[in-house]
Amino acid sequence: MTELDSLSATSRAYDAVASTYAEMFHDTLDERPLERALLGAFAELVRASGGNVADLGCGPGHITAHLHGLGLNAFGVDASPVMVGLAREANPELRFEIGSMGALDIGDGTLGGVLSRWSVIHTPPQDLPVVVSEMARVLAPGGHLLIEFPATDGPHHETQAYDHTVVTAYRWCPDRLAGLLRAHGLQESARLVIEPKPTDKRQFREVQLLAYKAS
């Protein structure tokens, strides 16, 4: 499957479930204090360095709105037109755009921050370097990236596919993904690993990497 085919399939899949997704996850941060704390730290770092923030794979815009509430000039980008429509309807004061993470319509070095919250999980492994390259390209020197993803079972697995509810998704090896960030000039500054609860449907770890673009 080519990158274009994968993006198109993912976009169509999320178009079909957009309303249900928005209803299910609009309050997703309420029971996630660790993630709220890291988002707060991310916001503080970006405010100190200045610049706009892109929420890539923003879905219905609830996290973009949360970033706005933390004092950031945040806007959202998503490949699903229906998701973007819902985001605009729910947050008319914010900017949301239809776009691809592999070809962002954003100028070089113009952003103080990039958030990628679970948005790379549907990126085929061979296309991930292109997406990371775009994240690095749009960040200004000293800008910050917060990227969140499900982790593989161990370092011997670079990626592992799993049966996501919407469309095929991938888990990533945290060390390998951090290495990919370094290869594109993004230096890891912090890492949060959340272990699954015994009652969780999927028994794998969640990882959040905080990185900055070297000057």
Image: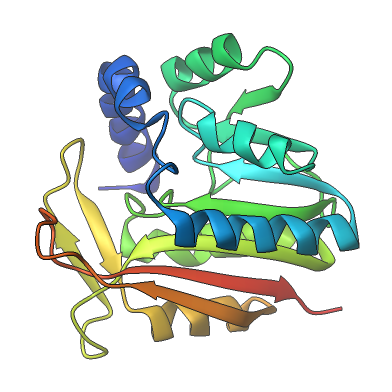
Q: Position of residue 147 (x, y in %)?
A: 52, 62
Q: Quadrant of residue 19?
A: top left
Along the viewing direction, whichever of 109 and 62 lies nearer the viewer: 62
Name the side, left or right, on which 121 lies relative to 183: left
Along the viewing direction, whichever of 209 and 98 lies nearer the viewer: 209
Name the side, left or right, on which 215 lies relative to 45: right
| Residue 97 appears in the rendering | yes
Q: Residue furthest bottom?
A: 156
Q: Position of residue 119 (x, y in %)?
A: 43, 48
Q: Residue at x 41, y 52 (%)?
A: 32
| Residue 139 appears in the rendering | no
Viewport quadrant of the C terminus: bottom right
Classify 161 as above or below 106. Answer: below
Q: Quadrant of residue 184?
A: bottom right
Q: Position of residue 152 (x, y in %)?
A: 23, 75
Classify 165 as above or below 114. Answer: above
How was the colour assigned to the protein in this rendering? rainbow
Classify 179 as above or below 161. Answer: below
Q: Position of residue 144 (x, y in %)?
A: 72, 65
Q: Residue at x 13, y 58 (%)?
A: 202
Q: Quadrant of residue 40?
A: bottom right
How many labels, in total? 0
Q: Residue at x 72, y 73 (%)?
A: 212
Along the viewing direction, whichever of 127 and 66 lies nearer the viewer: 66
Q: Residue at x 26, y 70 (%)?
A: 205
Name the side, left or right, on which 196 lies relative to 39: left
Name the side, left or right, on which 210 lies relative to 172: right
